[in-house]
Amino acid sequence: MVTAFIVIVFLAIMLIPFIRAKWKGIITITTVCILCVLTGIVSIQALLGISTEYTLPGTLVTGEIAIRADALSAWFILTINFTFFTGALYGFYYMKAYKEQTANLSFHCIAYILVHSSLISICLLQNSLVFLFVWEIMALASFVLVIFEHHKQETLKAGINFLIQAHVCILFLMVGFIWVISRTNSFDFKAISDFSLSSSRLSGLVLFLCFFVGFAIKAGFVPFHTWLPYAHPAAPSHVSGVMSGVIIKIGIYGILRMLLLITSDYTTIGYIILIVSVISGIYGVMLAIIQHNLKKLLAYHSIENIGIIGIGIGLGSIGMGTGNKILTLLGFSGALLHTLNHSLFKSILFYAAGNVYQATHTMNIERLGGIIKPMPHTAVLFLIAAVAICGLPPFNGFVSEFLIYNGMFSGFQSAGIAFLSSLVLSLFGLVLIGGLAILCFTKAFGTVFLGSERHHFNHIPEEAETGKLIPMYLGTIFIIAIGLFPKYFIMALSEPVSLYTQNVHFKNIAEFPMIETLSMTGICSFGFIVLSGLIFLIRKKATANKTQSINATWGCGYVGPTNKMQYTASSFIRTYRKLAKPVLSVHKKKKLVQGVFPIDGSHETHPYDKSEEWLIDYPLKQVKYFFNRFIFLQNGNAQFYILYGVVFIVGILGIPVLYYAVKSMISFLNQI
């Protein structure tokens, strides 16, 4: 399997540069499908309890390379495969608009295959040196995907920002691995367990925090998230879907893997993850609400959902530390299921945003409106994914959040004061996240798809072609299936979660009546939707023969265009923006309406991330200020540059002479 995997990737990469644009996409889809089948078989076996292990001979440097497919790897590989398959299918049609850019398409397709294969490899590799090597391939290939439209300055800046922070992530991972290797003299991941068992709990905690920071940068936890809102909007929409769906999830995989390998104070680790996650979830959705760029809004929602996943991981870790296996089971189950759920609805949302962009050539929410009329399929699919991401039944987001909520409630029964306080705050945070998410997507869907158009386009927007809609419908099928039949997907989590709980799992389903409650909630909600649909159809049939007239909406006595009287994205959340003003950074630019007969007026809001301002902008400003104090050295005078060269040469020659002179003097004084 390993040989076939490597050969297929190598052949695809070698073939793509020499074929026509259409065939580049076909080869990419074919390669992704073959990799999905190869790794999917192994992953399904692992979820059924049959783990697979290979040992490659490696090199003199790496030693033997261990490849292990356990249930945790399997869950992430299956999630990665489905998202990359739908992304490749959507991208094949999305990239038709760029078919003239042959060289760019070659790099893009090669990078797509490399990212897919490297993500799968990261989930399987158990050798730290090779792991870092493949992680670097993933970072560089992702950078190439992000900067596809590199002629745009903002795209290039976003890509460089992503690349720099990706290497900061690698730096922390390297420090952790080097620490382990220096103590155990082994690259195998088992050495991490040996190191933590032979060291103090404090050393294990510090080692975990080192890895956590590295993986948290990739995952997009606050305050390590600042690359994410720039990279997602800059990339093509299918890449945005893949980045949000699975590339950032590899950081979640890394955190979960280290929790299995490092034995330490899990309670402290759980509190740290829980605090960071609650802050990430609330801060991410608060910033998402005030965005005017649709893809940037969705990017901040990725931070919010990473926070929800982190809450589940934090609860599970506390359960491991306190011996509460039900809390561990529900916490990790909710986190793993939400990892899958988020990859489904977020990729659909980004694909829908791509459809809107190619139909209107803008992502500015303030310029959109009434898109549901020419693009009904995109609008309905966006709405389903939006309801799912808000955690409402009968869709999949409700199921994973329900598991996390139940984990919190199970923790109340045996909680001390400190734990009880953290649970209450986490519960409040998760409720707040859900409420704000509903506000955000009400604004996004209402402003983009409902009402009348706010801007007159030179062309009439049209529905996306069938090829773009098929991957969106595939994801929607899973969204509905998980919501209606959660029992089967939760059962699939038994093997991954049993790695953390040992004996407690979902296989004895009778012990968990909440799962039946979930199923009944989903079925009842679906029944309500079907009943509503039937009533709508009956009404449509009953009024089919009646004359219908379409007129302009009553303008309250005004004769101006009614599209000016609609809510804009800014006005819709004005009250919220005022309430959240102390936390958010919003720059306003306005021209007041004056006079009895005013001619014009304007009001613009430009949101900014305060954490980016404090943690990146301010330090960079101070560094620039420091180096600018030495700018006099670069004065354009050739004589000074010659002098610098002479001083450098004298210094190079003089330092050794001075060193030996001082050494001789000390030796002479010692003899006296």
Image (cartoon, grey):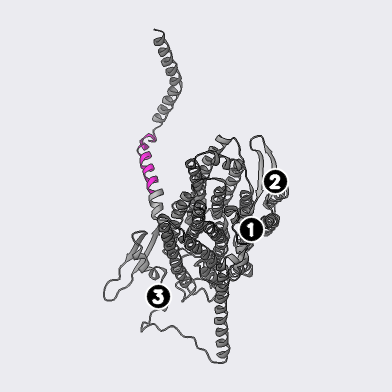
Q: Secondary structure at mark 3?
A: helix
Q: Quadrant of the C terminus?
A: top left
Q: CA distance from mark 1 to mark 2?
A: 19 Å
Confirm or deny contact between disc 3 and disc 1 (CB under 8 A). Answer: no
Confirm or deny contact between disc 1 and disc 2 (CB under 8 A). Answer: no
Give, as a single range, the part of the protein colored magenta. Answer: 617-636
User: Residue at point 46% right, 73% down?
Assistant: 446
Q: Quadrant of residue 652?
A: top left
The residue lying furthest to the front in this view is 414
Amino acid at circle 2: Tyr
In primary-sequence order, the first of circles 1 and 2 is 2
Q: Quadrant of residue 482?
A: bottom right
Name the chief secondary structure element in magenta.
helix
Residue identified by numbered label 1: 78
Q: Secondary structure at mark 1?
A: helix
Q: CA distance from mark 3 to mark 1?
A: 47 Å
Q: Is residue 61 visible?
A: yes
| Badge number at residue 54 | 2
User: Residue at point 40% right, 71% down?
Assistant: 572
